[in-house]
Structure formats: C-alpha cells, structure tokens
Amino acid sequence: MDIIKPSTIAGVMELLPDSQAVFDRMKNTIEDTFKDYGFLAIDTPVIEKNEILFAKGGGETEKQIFEIASDSKDMSLRFDLTVPLARYVSEHLSDLNFPFKRYQIGKVYRGERNQKGRYKEFYQADIDIIGHNDLAIYNDALLARVIFEAFNRINFPNITFHINNRKLLNGFFKSLEIEDSTEVLRTIDKKDKIGIDKTKTLLKEIIGEDKANKTLEFINADNENTEILDNLAGFADNDLFKKGLEELKTIYDYMIKFGIDDKNIKIDLAITRGLDYYTSTVYETFINGYESIGSVCSGGRYENLASNFTKQNLPGVGMSIGLTRLFYQLQELGLVEEEKSSKIDFLILPMDKEYHFYAIDVLHKLKDQGKKADIFLEDGKFKKKINYADKINAKYAVIIGEEEVSKNQVSIKNMESGEQFNKNIEELDF
Amino acid sequence: MDIIKPSTIAGVMELLPDSQAVFDRMKNTIEDTFKDYGFLAIDTPVIEKNEILFAKGGGETEKQIFEIASDSKDMSLRFDLTVPLARYVSEHLSDLNFPFKRYQIGKVYRGERNQKGRYKEFYQADIDIIGHNDLAIYNDALLARVIFEAFNRINFPNITFHINNRKLLNGFFKSLEIEDSTEVLRTIDKKDKIGIDKTKTLLKEIIGEDKANKTLEFINADNENTEILDNLAGFADNDLFKKGLEELKTIYDYMIKFGIDDKNIKIDLAITRGLDYYTSTVYETFINGYESIGSVCSGGRYENLASNFTKQNLPGVGMSIGLTRLFYQLQELGLVEEEKSSKIDFLILPMDKEYHFYAIDVLHKLKDQGKKADIFLEDGKFKKKINYADKINAKYAVIIGEEEVSKNQVSIKNMESGEQFNKNIEELDF
C-alpha cells in the first residue's frame, strides 16, 4: 500500500500531549474565572450562513473566509465569535436574561497567509456583557477585573490595560474640525509599528502641521494616569469629548476600586481598536516586559451588537483573548511551564498475567478512594513496565509480583524519589 | 438598515445557556473519567488535507464531506476523529509513549440530509488505546470499564455492552465455506432494522437455505452469556474461530472482573460493526429500556490504525460516543436533568450608585473566600434587581441599601427559601 506522508494543513497549532495538557489547563483556568463571575457558556456552530457572516459587509475578513464548497455557496466557517454572538442573542432574545453575560471559547478560521505565528485555525476566548436597551458603564471596569483575574490565575499577574475612549477621541477631532477622522485614526493605530516620525509625516499630510502637532500632543500624553485625566479637560470642550472624558474617568476609578493597581493601567490615548465597531471604551492588554508580542486581550464597548439581525438595541462590552497565538508566543519566549505534574497517581504493574485479577482488585480499591489510577496489561519484563510508569509520569508504580501476592501485599515505588515500600492489601488507604 | 433573520444553518444543535450547562457537564464528566484512567487529551485541527481524509478511499463518508472552497480543492472538514488520530499517531510516532492512551472530544462534520436528530455538526467523544506492534487483548475490557464508569457518572448506570468478535464471525463463515462474507455480514448488520424474516430471506438468497439456517442459529443465540460461550465451541473448529472464541471469553471474564455486572453484558453474535475496519472485538452499547435510540457508544479492535500513513504496525482498540446525538435523544426522552443548581453563589445588589464601592468591597471579601460572586451594576428599582437574581438562579442575593451601609452591614436573602438576614461586613464568612 502506498504510504501518504502524515501531516496537518499549514498554519494550525497541533500539540503533543504534554503541551496539550498545559494549553488545556490555561484554557480551563480562564474558563473557570469567567464562570466564577457568573458568565454563561454558549457553543455556536463553526459553520454559519454566509448571509450572517457577511451581514456587516465585506472588508478584510471576507477575503480571509473559508467557504464550504457547495452548489449554493451559502456557508462558511466563522472568522470570529462576535458575529455568531450577535446572531445568537438576536435569535434567542426572548429566552435570555439581560444583562446577558456570556463567554465562548472556540476555534475560529481565517485564511491567513502561511507565516510563523499566524494561524488559519485558532482559539478565541471571548467574554461579553450585553444589555437590552442599556448597560451601565461600570461593567467596562468589571470586565477588566475578570480579565485581570484570569491572567493572574494563569500566572501572568503583571499585565497592563491600555484604555481609551472613542467618544473622547472623536470629540477631540471634532474640536479640531476634522470631519472624517478615519484616516487619522488609522494612522494613530499604526504609530507603534511605523514610529513617531513617520506618524507625524503622515498626519501632516492628512490634516496639516498645526492639527498634526495638536493630535500628537494629545495622543502622546505620558504622565501618571491621574495627571493625564486631569489635563485632558484642556484639550476640548464639546459634549462628546466631555462625555468620553467622564466615562474614561469613571472606568479608571472603578478599575482601581476593582483591585487593579494603578501600575496595571495605562490611560493610552493612542489606542483606537478598529474604526467603526467600538463606540466608547477600548482596551488592549499587554504583558509587562513582553509588550513586543502585542496585545494579548483586546476589546471595548459597542453601542449596538446586532443591528443587522434585530431592531432591538443591544449595547455591550466585550474582550477577547487570542489563546492560540498567546500560547505560541509564550512558548517561544520560554514562558510556558511544561506540565511536570503527574497525570496519574498510581500505575499498577502486574508482573505476570496470572496476577492480573489481583491487580484489578487493587485498581478497584484505589478507584474507590477517588484516585487517578490505571493498570498496565502488556506482557514484558520489569524494566519495560517501570519505564512506562516513568515515561507517563505516574506518581507511584504499584508493583505486583509473586512475592507481593504471596504476602497479600503490593510494592509501591515513589517514581520521583525512588523510595519503595510494601503495603498490605487491606491497608491501601491514601 | 435591512434586518437579516438570525438563524443557524440547518442540522446543528445550538443550546440555550441552561441546556448548554447540562451538556457541558455531561461532556466534562466523561472527559474527567477518561483522564482518571490516564488517557491523554489531543486536539487536532478541524480542517485536514483531503489526501489524509480520503486515504482509505471513498465510500459513504466521502459523499458527505464538507470541502473547503478553494482553487486547489485540497482541504475538508474532518468527518470523524479516527482518521485524524491515525494521522496524528503516525506523524508524532517517535514522540509518543506506547501503549498510547488518548481521548479526543471534538466536533466532526457530515453533510447529512436535513432530518430530525441528524446532525451536520456533532460532538464525538473518542477514546483509544494504541499499541506499537502489539497490544494485549485485556485492554478491550479495560476500555469497556472506562466507558461503563463514564455512563455511571453521567447517571446512566444501566447500560448493556453488546460484544462480539470478528475472528469468531469470520471463522464461523469459513467453516461454512463462505469465502466472501461481506454480503452476509451486511445483512446480519441490518437484522434489527429489517426483521428476522427478511434477514432469513436475504441470507437464503446469498448462501442457500442450509447455511442461512446455520447462520441464523449462530447469530440468534440468546441464552445466558456463559451458556452462549460454552455452546459456541460446537459451531466450528478452525483456528480463526478458536482464536476469536478465546478472545471473546477472555474479554468477557475481564469485563466481569473489572466490575461490569453480567447483566450489563450481552454476548451478541449479530453485532458486526462495519465491514473492514475492525478485526477482533466489536462492541455496541445500549441504555437499558431505551434500546430503540440505538447504540450510544460503539467501537472495537483494529489490527492496524494507520497503514495508510506509516509502515509501523499500530494495533488498537477504541470506542466512540456520539455526544450530540445522545444528548438530543436523552432530551427527547425527558431524561436530561435541567440544570437547577445555581451558577453563582452570591449576586450583590447595590440599591444605588452611591453604594457601588461599598458593594465592591463586599465582592472582594466573597472572592477572597473563593466564592462565585458577581455584582449587579445597573440602575433600577429593587424589584428589577431581585428579579434578575432570581432569573439567573443566584443562591443568595446580597442587598446593599442605605440602612445596610449605615449599619456597616449587608442584607442576605436566600433566594430559594426567601429567608433574609443581616450580617456585619466584618463577619462575612461563608
């Protein structure tokens, strides 16, 4: 028979079992944190109708979509969890309680070009709070608290939330009489990539030197958070600007109150997060000392989640962690702690077939005590068996041979210390 | 803006949060059981190369596959977890420990026609033990034990394993000098669907009356398990048959020893499980009293997992639960217990904005004790707030109003009993 070289498609992350265990633990810890704050799980299909996915109309994502081949060409793989959320909430509106707090951790698909660290299939962990008609601004701080705790629990307590407010930005540009700020925002968004000089040049071209300088002065504010907030009032005084400033101040105050230290927050007026979706708070989150890997959790507040699918007004706030990319980057930086802990407490090793039933009795005794235990049923010499116990990282090997059986005992070997001791069958309490 | 009616594609299961919680608990319980026996998680991509998925060549599944639209037409969605497992094990052979015990719970895709209870996207929970060159037959019984325990833990202790052995079947047909048993096996496989008379007619057409009668006598054995096993020796005596009988006896004995009661096992010589994949043990599993929903967990032993991808010999044994279909059927039968338990212990209800910070202090106190707690930050009257606590099924509402704050207290309402009591802030220990 012809052998086909076994390989995955390009641009996916497939892990060996040890790394998979670490990834799963990270994923589960984040999920547990979400649950502990009352967020509910949903699980939408990976395949959605094109009319749903493309409801917002075109753009970059449309080019990257994986369409299902069929005559009707009407289904594709989801490219994020936000469009499915909008569809889900609109479809099940009358069955949900608002504010609806949901999380979803699942795979999404984008036809990214093959490139290191770019994935065609990757996990997103999304968390959103959605109101019906209104949703208090304080939730924006609560959400940051949940994310802060999630990163704490996966051993990254040193993160910084960069926060900004789109009303504040738009109010500022309004005061400069810049009617269409799209290009300006796009340029600011690239600032860290293209550098400050290039940003300045581009801004000058778009809005002239005077406004460019004012804009740079505005977005480059780099004092203490409270100073920035205090100074902001001087930049503009239209209602939109004032509303944005008030929101930003409130969220900052509440984040502090929610136990996020001032050093873990940076009022960053250069954060813009896309151009049309977010309408108020925007956040990006960086791991301190590893800012170069980019934002590990981003999001913001939107005025209306699902205007394409319902006439109901559904304001919300959400954040998203790109889990697969995050894991890849942490691995590259050597920041992922490999799973050293045992996946199994006891591996029972009968030395011969004739001791199998005796060994199974021992298995039952351990299982009755809720232990993670398994039994090795292959033929082979002692060395093969104990090697397997070692390789699979069993905490204890439970050896059962002629002597043990004759004495109604088992021999227990601590696989880490090498220490070995005998126990009577009746005394197998751990 | 035009409103697009929000809906999923046909043939997928999408659950409301309460049902989702029940489904997730079922899934997690099964996963925990697998883990407790030392099975390792893997997570392969949903998209695989066509050359991998079609390596075995054609058949029914190929017609049902979801192909990704692209010029190269070289990728599709997986239709099961077995082909990806074969690819994974071959690809990572040198990095795995054998016997390799893996589970995978994930979504698979088939272009099933739209029909109630038929899904285009559904979860499979697969568990396999794979040897390198050899794998002791006892593992077939261990696997049944793990599945038995998983169903126990999800509150279905009353299941019956129907077990058979392909060597035994093939040995029997050899003794009848039936060279190609494909058609015979296919007919037997349909027995429960088409009825015994139709089966008899078909068998007569294929192998003549005499052999048809002998075959029916063989597959219809319906005594006690031990009697069936004792009587079998009389049916044939070639080596293949004897080997199959020995294996079947061994697995039966070991299943009993592994704590599966005789009443939960049925030696069923009419179980065939497909035609070319399995080579020894085959199993199907039924929920007692609900046999009509079909097998809820099926599988068997195969001689070589991955002959398309590697020259290495990888014998194994595996079983698979079709989780989505199972859940659907249990729901239809009213056997799914809806999640009544609270998802959150404490919902904190500040009666006014001015008590928010006080309320957040209370939140921190509860969180420090590891409680699942959340805070309601919306405006509104008492009734709206307490209604929300009721709807989301909070165990306790923690009410914070003017009086509570002035006394340095909170008012705690047990949402089930309606009982309400005050506690001093310093005494918030639960």
Image (cartoon, coloured by chain):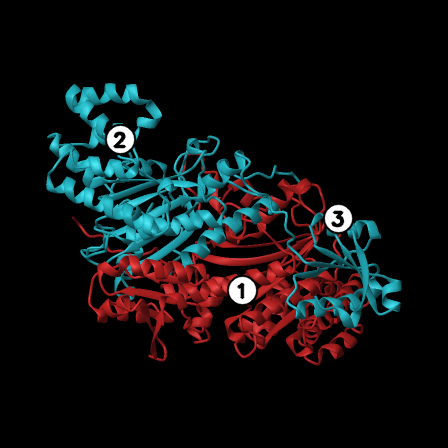
Chain colours: A red, B cyan
- The chain that hosts pointer 2 is B
Q: Residue at x 69, y 50 (%)?
A: B392
Q: Nearer the viewer, residue A340 or A46?
A: A340
Q: Is residue A81 among what the camera can see?
A: yes
Question: Eyeballing the image, is B275 above or below B315?
Answer: above
Type of residue at label 1?
A: Thr
For label 2, count other residues whose C-alpha is less than 10 Å away and answer few (under 14), some (14-19) or many (20+): some
Q: Residue at x 41, y 73 (%)?
A: A340
Q: Is residue B47 among what the camera can see?
A: no
Q: Check whether the beta carbons of the residues at disc 3 and disc 1 lie within 8 A of each other.
A: no
Q: Position of residue A168 (x, y in %)?
A: 74, 65
Spatial separation of the CA atoms under disc 2 and disc 3: 67 Å
Q: Which mark is residue B221?
A: 2
- Residue that numbered label 3 is attached to: A133
* Helix, strand or loop status at disc 2: loop
Circle nearer the viewer, 2 or 3: 2
Q: Position of residue A66 (x, y in %)?
A: 44, 48
For label 1, count other residues whose C-alpha is less than 10 Å away and answer few (under 14), some (14-19) or many (20+): some
Q: Nearer the viewer, residue A397 or B302?
A: A397
Q: Position of residue A138 (x, y in %)?
A: 74, 62
* Helix, strand or loop status at disc 3: loop
For label 3, count other residues whose C-alpha is less than 10 Å away and answer few (under 14), some (14-19) or many (20+): some
Type of residue at label 3?
A: Asn
Q: Nearer the viewer, residue B143 or A309?
A: B143
**Picture quarter with the N terminus of chain B:** top right
- The chain that hosts pointer 3 is A
Q: Which mark is residue A29?
A: 1
